[in-house]
Image (cartoon, coloured by chain):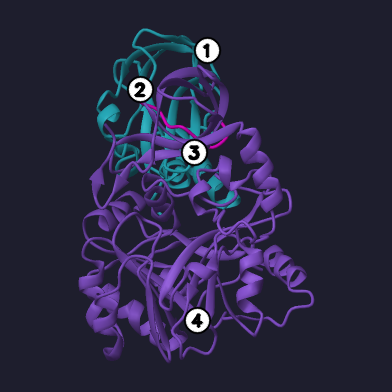
Chain colours: A cyan, B purple
Amino acid sequence: MSAVPAGLKYTRDHEWLREEADGTLTLGITDHAQRQLGELVFVELPEVGSVLAAGQGCVVVESVKAASDVFVPVAGSVVAVNEALEQDPGRINTSPYGDGWLLRLQPASAAQDLLDAAAYQQLLDTTA
Amino acid sequence: MPKRTPLFERHVEAGGQMVPFGGWEMPLHYGSQIEEHHQVRRHAGIFDVSHMTVLDVGGPDALHWLRRLLANDVARLVAGQALYSCMLNEAGGVIDDLIVYRRAEDAPTPYRLVANAATRDKNLAWMQAARAGLDVRIEARDELLMLAVQGPQACGLALPLLPAALREPAAALKPFHAVESADAFIGRTGYTGEDGWEVLLPVETGRAFWDAALAAGIAPCGLGARDTLRLEAGMNLYGQDMDEEHSPLVSGLGWTVAWEPDARAFIGREALERERMAGPASMLSGIVLEGRGIMRHGQKVGTEAGDGLITSGGFSPTIGRSIGLARVPIGASGACEVEIRGVRQAARLCRPPFVRRGRVLLS
């Protein structure tokens, strides 16, 4: 079991968010999520410029087992997507908090109800 | 409580992720099912398939009974030969698919059947009912380990691991033939589209074979790779591509039905003959997704001849895109569409297999 990185924010749906210096948010799925999904074979990313509502499905990740939606926890517009995932979706498995990031968002409002690393770890511990 | 094969501890030690499957706890993968898939296509892999149901069949009426029980005709077999067949209900639906081996003349029973795991109880109940009034003995060989070594290098690497007396005859086996000695049974069969053997051994020698195979560089492979390999090879999975609601004629298995001789009254024959006369309404076809995305079981397929369903779908590691099997109206061919998560995507019907002996067969 790898550690939950400090300094990121987490959702109960096993996504992570990182606040960048320019005020944008980077979104990905957690190590726990990629383990549950299994090896990823396809990622469907939104268009750059898409405007997303909080709670909207924004990315589809398909593993050898099943397809899952990734929900954006905060409203905003997509300023970048990780295009490398189109050729190599396995980056999400090997580096969920690094090379396996999904997209970058310009938030329209402050994110709410996010967990810090300790609270997310606690969630994992209680649902394991 | 799910059952465990005698290799359970080995699987866990090798990093196997154990999952429930047909009443058993089996390895899904040992880290990467895609890598395991490639190992079998390019080199060699070993699968623990001890969960499968192995039945030895004998008694004076064994041949008569099997010719009534199975849609393929066991009378066609010579000693050492195997046959793939469906076992049908009266309506022609598939109760299970299995392999029958005609064993050597000096074997304790003349026949050995290998059927699925999840269907075990209903199979045995059906077989008992069909045995009424006949002198047939059925013995479940649950104490045997069954291991499949598959891949272009599998037989070469596994040959030195076989009992000495069987090495030469095993190396000479043609596809769908088997050889055995007192405590080992080797068939040139499999579920991957690659060369290989399926080996039945007692527990202790089976464990030793597993250990030696891994030491020889044969990769342990789980159910995940088994599924993508069989799908690329165009082989049906019971419960998805065939079931009790569908006959072999609409499941791509018409070739396994032995119509001759006319007089052989196998269970389901009348229903199949009616269906054949009327013309089957549907068929099982291969399907390839043109773009990116993954087809899954149960998704709707639109063709020029009408709608159908994906029965098996997934990602093909060898081809690098999504392939599947689909039940579509008879006569459907060429371009079609699959509804994936509410979006219709371009696909194309084709003839399976998709991959065989390491070669991509898609045009």
- Tag 3 and tag 2 share a subunit: yes
- Report the front residue among B217 and B160: B160
Disc 4: host chain: B
- Chain letter for mark 1: A
Please, which chain is the residue tagged with disc 2 on?
A
The chief SS type of the magenta part is: loop
Q: Which residue is mark 4?
A: B144
Mark 3 burial class by Cα count in 10 Å: few <14, some 14-19, many 20+? some
Residue numbers of the magenta segment: B292-299
Distance from the alpha carbon under mark 2 to that under mark 1: 15 Å
Query: Mark 3 to mark 1: distance in Å?
Result: 25 Å
> Contact (CB < 8 A) between labels 2 and 4?
no
Instruction: Tell me, yes or no, if residue B197 can be seen here.
Output: yes
The image quadrant of residue B333 is: top left
Task: Mark 3 and mark 4 in contact? Answer it, CB < 8 Å.
Answer: no
Above or below residue B35? Residue A46 is: above
Which residue has dot 3 on it?
A: A66
For the residue marked with disc 4, what is the amino acid? Answer: Leu
Q: Is residue B355 magenta?
A: no
- Residue under label 1: A53
Name the residue located 62 percent from the left edge and 45 percent from the top edge: B247
Which residue is at a point 33% across and 30% down the rendered structure image? A101
Crowdedness of circle 2 by 10 Å Cα count: few (<14), some, many (20+)? Answer: many
x then y, percent, for residue A78: 37, 13
Q: Of B205 and B234, which appears nearest the observer?
A: B234
